[in-house]
Image: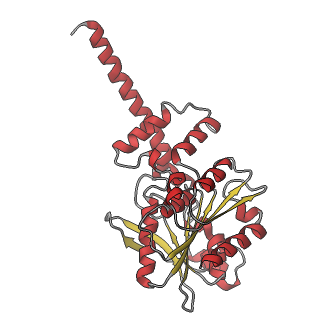
Amino acid sequence: MNKRVKSLLKFAVVAGASYLAVGEAVYEVVLGKKYTQMKNLRREVNEELYDYYGKPEDQIDGDAWFVAMRPEDTTLVNSRGKTMHANIFMQKEYTDKWAVVVHGYTSCPRALADQAHHFYKNGFNVLMPHLVSFGLDEEKYASMGYYDKDYVKEWIAYIINLDSTARIAVLGVSMGSATTMLLTGESDLPSNVKCAIADCGYTSWWEEMGYEMKNTYKAPIFPFMYAANTVSKLRGNFDFRKSAPVKAVANSKTPTLFIHGEKDKLVPPYMLDKVYDACTSDKQKLPVPDAYHAESNEVHPEIYYPAVFSFVEKYL
């Protein structure tokens, strides 16, 4: 072997190792639980808070209601042998109306307490899953909707096992919205799922991560995204390109309301039109003025909730 070939091989080895090292670093920071939990909105619920908030029926604020309800941890072992966690809030009297409320990235059920509270006040049982690697989930790496959709589907099966006549609405925000859209693209989704609300979801994780790399971090897509995706696949996690809600909704038969804040800087508003246009089911679109990412329900509740419940009641 001549010196030129040896030099090329040495360069290839160094370049390959550097590529994987870059990918490992990006993968850990973006999807690793060690980092995502630092920003997690889980916030412990304890007896001191229970005593402070009192009775749930006296609460106006969604977060106070969530705490006052003393949420219990419900667990379920899924088809992959993993233990899933959820908070479930049942009405005192029987109803077959259910809402599955799906949180976003670096978050947990409590972060969507406002949406859950509104569903509960409107007579729904509410199930709020902890998604892959967030909240109480034991997985070490997030999947940005890819495996999360399977979590939600198994919780839907859990609901149907409790009540075969259950009528279910699914609402997701941000990554939870992406999860919801991916769910609607499943060919075997039970007919009990009557409608979905996708609030500020991205077209695909690949496009969303590319947008953030360029606009937030001012970094090139290559090698960072490509290397992180390589590491994800080598670790047996998801292929970034396959977490693509815009493709899933093209196969959807679930009526879907698409919501997006017009000032969203994290998931750009143009993605609203792309997923809406791609969707093949009954659909509505709600751009919310003055709202940044995942804030539409807070900035304009007088627009958000009437639209949500008008849509839901139409299909339930």
Determine if residue 94 is in view: yes
The image quadrant that residue 119 belongs to is bottom right
In depth, the one of 255 and 173 nearer the eye is 255
Q: Is residue 202 left or right of residue 22?
A: right
- Regarding residue 54, the answer to whether it shows in the image is no
Considering depth in this image, is 74 or 195 the residue closer to the camera? 195
* Quarter of the image where the N terminus is located: top left
Instruction: Locate residue 211 relative to residue 20 in the image: left or right.
Output: right
Q: Tell me where residue 252 appears, x and y as whole percent.
A: 51, 62
Left or right, 237 with respect to 130, comes to left
State which quadrant residue 70 falls in: bottom right
Where's the C terminus, which quadrant?
bottom right
Toward which corner of the image does residue 107 lie, by quadrant?
bottom right
Q: x%, y% of residue 236?
A: 34, 48
**What is the residue that sits farthest to the left in this orientation?**
1
Q: Residue at x 57, y 86 (%)?
A: 91
Residue 135 placement (x, y as % from top left): 50, 62
Q: Residue 219, image x and y in percent? A: 58, 32
